[in-house]
Image (spheres, rainbow, N blue to C red):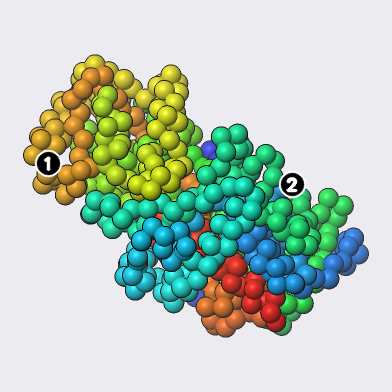
Amino acid sequence: MTNESKGLSRRSFLGLGATAAALAGVGLVGCAPAKPASKEEAAAAAASDWLGAEPEIAEDKIVETVDTEILVCGAGTSGLFAACAAAEEGAKVVCLEKAAIGGGVRDNLGSLNSRLQKEAGCVIDENEICNDLTRYANGYVNPRLYHIWAQNSGEAVDWYQDRLEEAGFQLFFEAANHAKPSAYKHWATGHIPSWPADAEFAGIEGVVNGKIVLGDYAKEKGVDFRFTTPLVKLVHENGKVTGAIAKGPDGYIKINASKGTIVCTGGYARNEDMLEALQPQTMNKYSLSIAIDGTVGDGIKSCLWAGARMDEIHTAMVFDRVAVKPDEFGGSQTTGSLFWMGSNPWLKVNLNGERFINESAPYDYVLNAALTQPNRTVVDIWDSDYATYLEQFDIHGCARVYPFENGAPTNMTLDVVQGINQGLLDQGYIVQADTIEELAKGLGIPADTLKKTVERQNENFDAQADPDFGKEAFRLSPVRKAPFFGVRSSGYMLCTLDGITINEQFQALNENYEPIEGLYVAGVDSGSYYAGTYPNMSTGNCCGRSVTFARMMAKALAAK
């Protein structure tokens, strides 16, 4: 991982002036701040100018002009669904992609009322889940979009199931009809493909034998893919978007889109300046980025230059699955290593050896709580019977390591997780010890305090109750059987979740909340859906939303 993508050399901000300047640049602050009072503030403000001016591309620099009906900017999860849907309806489609090959479709698609859910007898009340999603976002969202997802996601996932089966693969529903009730309600919405053992993976999106299922399908339907051709800017005038300018291997290309342009370039998780300016707290929550390379905010910037507005609450998807060394702290100044079982409810303590949260909480709640603890660092503690407790925990979603009750596979099997742990042990991340005192010494935390915490943990397990934090009895695990294990842990960044404000037709809105003609936004470039946290208790919610809306908007544009 390069310093550029991970951001090991972090820019610091001096006071509120820099952040205000950054927000003013995208219209999120009502008035620009006064002239900085010092050279230091001026330098910080300049460093935070992540938006910059819209590029000016002279006509004589354009080497090719392409006319199409629908332009899709990005060939990842949303882009592939959009391109396929538009082409199926007979529309002429051009799809731009920065990389040399499309990104594939992310695993774990969340939906309601898919065929597979119905076959499994899973019934989810639409209002109940939509209200829960609104609660997770503290109301900073457009709840009508949740209902649109709930009412249309089943069709999108059914369509994807058909395409997978045509290509020789199977889609599974992560059934949970007999799941034990948990303190934080889980919604069984996830669907995951079963890829062959020899599948290649870029991040977590499947690329099977060098091919992408939907990418190949889209080509068969006539989609004109332009790879190694990133979006540079949208073509817009008088509040209307008519296409875009991209930079191909031979120079700038202008694409005229008569029916509409869909922007879905994957957010800005690899843009440190944007993260520092818009959500600096997130930088202290992760020590590893698995975000897709090249997701630096191209689409969001282009929309802002065209007059769109952005979410005011800035959010990222960060999961607690990273190990750091015993002498390191969590946060983006440290580069950690994958620790997949970190999202399970082990005994978790701070660097003082004290519990500080109900470990059964959603993934990023633990990381949020860690920001209030010494050096933002969590320490996971477990014993040699951990495989037994991994099954007992009955975790759902991508953190689960045992097959689901209907045989659906998991993202990572127990064997793979055990292999990851052994590697972490060999590399000095995980500490192994025969006594709690030795474990504490290896982890650099007070032995007396950790010993008392472990004794209390074992008492709670024996009583099958957690009066301290209210963790469910089936998610309690003792620390009794030597050897014992511990690791300092942090989070990993998957993607950003704040984007361009949209309406129920998925059109970008301007500062007056009016739709910008010709401009549609999908995936994590789009906003109005998440705020503050990711509701990971609805498995695959982000990808399910992305594919549903991308398919819907593309079909509607094709019908124009």
| Residue occupying image coordinates x 53% and y 61% | 157
Furthest residue in direction front, as rendered: 119
* Residue in the foreground of this view, choosing between 57 and 421: 421
Does 415 appear above or below 162? above
Q: Relative to the observer, which residue lies in front, 9 or 124?
A: 124
Name the residue located 59 percent from the left edge and 67 percent from the top edge. Answer: 550
User: Does residue 319 appear in the picture of this structure?
Assistant: no
Q: Which percent across, then down, holds residue 127? A: 34, 74
Mark 2 nearby-residue class (10 Å; few <14, some 14–19, many ≥20): few
Badge 1, how many Cα within 10 Å: few under 14, some, many 20+? some
| Residue 464: image tag | 1
Q: Label 1 is placed on what type of residue?
A: Gln
In this picture, is 484 found above or below 473? above
Where residue 528 sits: x, y (%)?
A: 48, 70
Judged left or right of residue 516, residue 146 is: left
Which quadrant is home to the N terminus?
Answer: top right
Residue 300, position in %: x, y?
A: 61, 63
* Above or below, 275 relative to 196: below
Task: Please report whichever mark, 1 or 2, sits nearer to the chain's N-terminal start.
Answer: 2
Please name the residue shown 83% across and 61% down the image. 253
| Residue 233, percent from left and from top | 72, 64
Label disc, if present, on residue 126 of the rendered structure: none
* Picture quarter with the C terminus: bottom right
Q: CA distance from mark 1 to mark 2?
A: 54 Å
**Disc 1, SS:** loop
> Which residue lies at the image location 45% right of the left edge and 38% below the top edge?
412
Disc 2 secondary structure class = loop
Q: Amino acid at mark 2?
A: Ala
The answer to whether any part of residue 238 appears in the image is yes
Q: Which residue is mark 2?
A: 100
